Amino acid sequence: MASAPRLTLYHVHGFRSSRVFWLARELQRSYGIADTGGGTRKHPRFGIPELKIMEFADADAFRAEKPAALLALNPNGKVPAALLEHPAPAGGGAAPPDVALFESGAIASFYLDTYDTEHLLLPPPGTNERAVFNVLSHWCTGTIDNLTSNSSPIQRALADPAAGRSDDVARRANATYAAHVFAPWLAAQLGLGLGGGDGGGEDRYICGPTFTAADVMVGHSFSHSRLLDFLRDPETEAEAAVVACVEDYAKLLRSRRDFQEVYYRSDEEE
């Protein structure tokens, strides 16, 4: 079997690169090669190379001055960015050229397509679950993330590199979208009936009772309180049921071991 390509992730704790980091840990654990407390074991049919992490420890310095190595990979000067390196062919000859990747949805999709060969987290092509993952890999990274973002997507073009979109008009619009567009869709996807019934007391994920990569795409937004803060003070019983459903889902994701180890480090929290 040919050696798998290696991926190096450029990362800032708490930033959107954490989505890819969390996904990699969940996938490694799914294949039985993560530390489970009783030692590690390698999946008998496939091995996932370790994801190499290049972390920028000072978030403020990162925002103020973009490292040249990062700009060579991502023209936006943001994380995540990743470098894909191919090994030389076993029979000799030159290795394929390295490839730069950026945008968390794109990196996550590539990582899953490359390493999740048994579809333990990424549903198979042609299924409804895969369609939902594809929707969320675009919707979350292109719209939902920006509801609570601390910086502009065109940050490099601004005079103040730390500038975000925090004016009152934008905040109100973001809160309205979160409460009246995103949250009801999410609650319906999780099985909340239109009449307010919860559909049972079992754990509910995006694609049913089993955790998948779709939950990682959504779950990054719950690594802080800003999105849930937009859902405070529901005005009707139906809205309160939606908020309760979303809060329960966020709590379920936050309870996962790999989520906690990626987002809730002991030394700092974004």
Image (cartoon, rainbow, N blue to C red):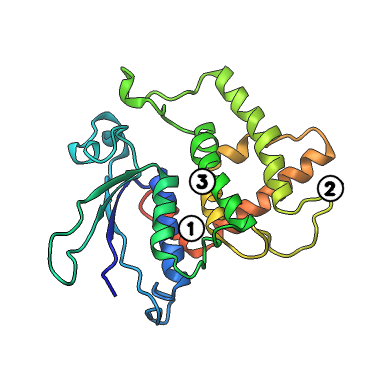
**Label 3 vs label 1, nearer the camera:** 3
Q: CA distance from mark 3 to mark 1?
A: 18 Å
Residue position for label 2 = 196
Residue position for label 1 = 259
Q: Amino acid at mark 3?
A: Ser
Q: CA distance from mark 2 to mark 1?
A: 29 Å
Q: Earlier in the sequence, mark 2 or mark 3?
A: 3
Helix, strand or loop at label 1? It is helix
Residue position for label 3 = 137
Helix, strand or loop at label 2? It is loop
Residue at the left extreme of this rendering:
93
Taking the spot 55% from the left edge, 37% from the top edge, the residue there is 144
Q: Amino acid at mark 1?
A: Phe
Image check: 66 left or right of 16? Answer: left
Residue 42, position in %: x, y? 37, 79
Residue 221, position in %: x, y? 53, 44
Q: Earlier in the sequence, mark 2 or mark 1?
A: 2
Residue at the right extreme of this rendering:
195
Considering the image in quadrants, where does the C terminus appear?
A: top left
Q: Amino acid at mark 2?
A: Gly
Taking the spot 61% from the left edge, 40% from the top edge, the residue there is 228
